[in-house]
Image (cartoon, grey):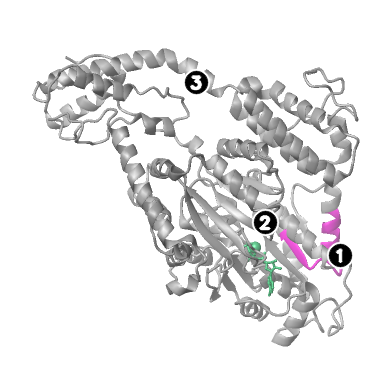
Amino acid sequence: MKKSPLPVQSTRSGTTDNKPITGKESLVKLLRWHFGHSDFRGKQLDAIQAVLSGRDCFCLMPTGGGKSMCYQIPALAKPGIALVVCPLIALMENQVMALKEKGIAAEFLSSTQPAHVRNKIHEDLYSGKPSIRLLYVTPELIATPGFMSKLTKIHSRGLLNLIAIDEAHCISTWGHDFRPSYRKISSLRNCFPDVPILALTATAVPKVQKDVIESLSLQDPLILKSSFNRPNIYYEVRYKDLVDDAYADMSSLLKCSGSICGIVYCLERTTCDTLAAHLSKNGISCAGAGIDRKDVRIVCHFNIPKSMEAFYQESGRAGRDQQPSRSILYYGVDDRKRMEFILSSAEGKKFQSSSSQDGLSKKSLSEFNQMVEYCEGSGCRRKKILESFGEQVPASLCKKSCDACKHPNLLAKNLEELTVTCAARQRSNFSRISITSSTDTIDREQFSEFWNRDDEANHSEEDISDSDDGTETVDCLARSGLKRKLGLNAKIDFLQRAEERYYQNKNSEKQVSKLAKNVVSDTMREASKQRLLNALKQALDRLGNLNIELEVSATFLENECYKKYGKSGKTFYYSQVASTVRWLSATDSTELTNRLGTNSPSPPGNTQSKQEPLDTPSPMLERRPAESTDLPPPTSLQSEISHSASPSVSPTSTQLPPIPSFSQFLNSKKAKTGHLGSSENPSPKGLKNTR
Ligand SMILES: Nc1ncnc2c1ncn2[C@@H]1O[C@H](COP(=O)(O)OP(=O)(O)OP(=O)(O)O)[C@@H](O)[C@H]1O
Ligand SMILES: [Mg+2]
């Protein structure tokens, strides 16, 4: 739909006599005419007027603050083309589609488009009078010499009126979504020194701002910062350690919220898949779709995020339409420990060769501590968020729109219970095998954690049996009559032998246990079928009635997933189910009927479908290296409920440090202190008794 030109204009939309519109009144008219908003919000007008006057601008506005308008209005108020650099193809697609619906000539260029579409865009760009007003591109395209030379031609004809860098924090190594290819766009300033650059981000870390301004060589930029308060979001923390079943809690929370769009963030993909299966089983549909929805009513974090910044960004996806929304974080002490471990080891690894290693590791941990304080503290959550970004606000700002302000007594009670529960758990964990660091006493009451199988199991991909050998050993030690006053060496011998037995047993158990834990159970298959059924229903709602038997088709699709990946274990199987669900959310009727065997899907159990079904992408192929140019797709975001693995922390990529065996530990102590007799060579895995 093409919109008729604005009444005040003589030529093309928004421009008169090739001069930009800069007056407030005319700009407001443009805003009303094209977007239907009555007035500018926050600092929008300042940013718009700055770039229209030719000045560079750095614009820091919270998520949903209306950053896009800061380049969309100038694009319409000035002749020529505004170039918008955007990190995600999904975001570009959404924005371009929304603009086109408003009758604004916008296009995007990416490798995902068919060649004929790209050619058409290029034709328009190099025609005498291009109609395109906003051209969205990825940073990778900017880095190609071919595109740069085309851009230079457009510029030489005086048609490049603005360069907007959306999500500009991606340029900065300090930004949470740092994207190396974004650095390459720093050449834009040199190539087009007279074109104003507008950098936009919702990331408030001062280092990011400095880094972005320097990398883009912004000249005397106007720096605009808006408050980060999101008054329409209600913040709440739920304590996993205080509920019987966090999955069930989340299911009922989402069910009670009615038919809304929500996003769930998990630390790992496997948690996403398990959670999605659980939610589907409970009638909550989960599927993949775009991420640019404004009407997300609830954002849940199923695991604690790594920093306040990441939390702010993710929770900020709620209520971008300014309507009342909720952020719910499920906090678990185990999750906290796990994240602490990941951050310290990941940073350590990443910066192994750097002298600043320790500093960076400490930085991540201290950033993470802000998140822990958000969860474990009793003060206003909103105030904590804003203070972490350097904003000092009165507590009255919150207006009881967080659980800490609304239910302070309940929160105090929860925190007290959490402390008691964790102290009790800690005692039972420490009593597995504990040894005092001074090495001169062994005492169940004096703890310095040395070997905690709980942690080991948490951090390792390896499955370690849950049997409580540690407790057994210590109990055995107590029962064996070895009194505290008895020789220390005798006690150590005893523990070393226990450890030896432990490893011998484990080596044989481990394989069996590992296999058993990875098996795809019937319950999982039933939950997956349910999930596919829901996705199918949605697909049919979208595509119209296709004469497809829902139950039979869901069984068929599940069977297909199982056939393909059931034997490879539950991770692959779940990924395949998730992948099929995503496919269902985007497929068309021909593909769907083809895959289901043209109106007559194979009966369950019939694994030899006559018609070769379209192959769903293998989970191994999901991280496409090619268009790799783009950020990893936000993992399986949504339909009614989306679930996403936070992309920035990947525990699976973290190499775990070896846990020393009991003997290794003792030997290293001996080497250091000269205590406990001679220092013999440490035996591998402590399988040899050193005495
Ligand atoms: N002046 C305005 N008045 C009313 N609504 C507005 C105004 N400007 C923008 N909006 C609306 O605010 C919503 C968010 O805008 P936009 O997507 O540009 O935010 P953003 O700052 O880019 O957020 P994000 O950081 O999530 O990308 C949109 O629905 C947009 O239409
Ligand atoms: Mg935006």
Q: What amino acid type is highlighted by mark number 2?
A: Ile
Q: Is residue 127 magenta?
A: yes
Residue where numbered disc 2 is placed? 142
User: Which residue is more in the foreground, 298 or 351?
Assistant: 298
Provide residue 550's location: percent of width, then percent of height. Answer: 82, 33
Crowd band around label 3 with a 10 angstrom C-alpha radius: few (<14), some (14–19), many (20+): some
Horizontally, residue 617 falls left or right of residue 215, namely: right
Q: Nearer the viewer, residue 467 or 350?
A: 467
Which residue carries the number 3 mark?
A: 514
x, y percentage for residue 683?
26, 18
Badge 1 amino acid: Ser
Does the Cβ of the disc 1 residue fall within 8 Å of ligand 1?
Answer: no
- Give residue 169's position: percent from left, percent from top: 55, 60
Residue drawn 86% across the image and 56% down it: 120
Q: What range of the chain is rendered magenta?
A: 119-136
Task: Name the residue beneath numbered marker 1.
Answer: 127
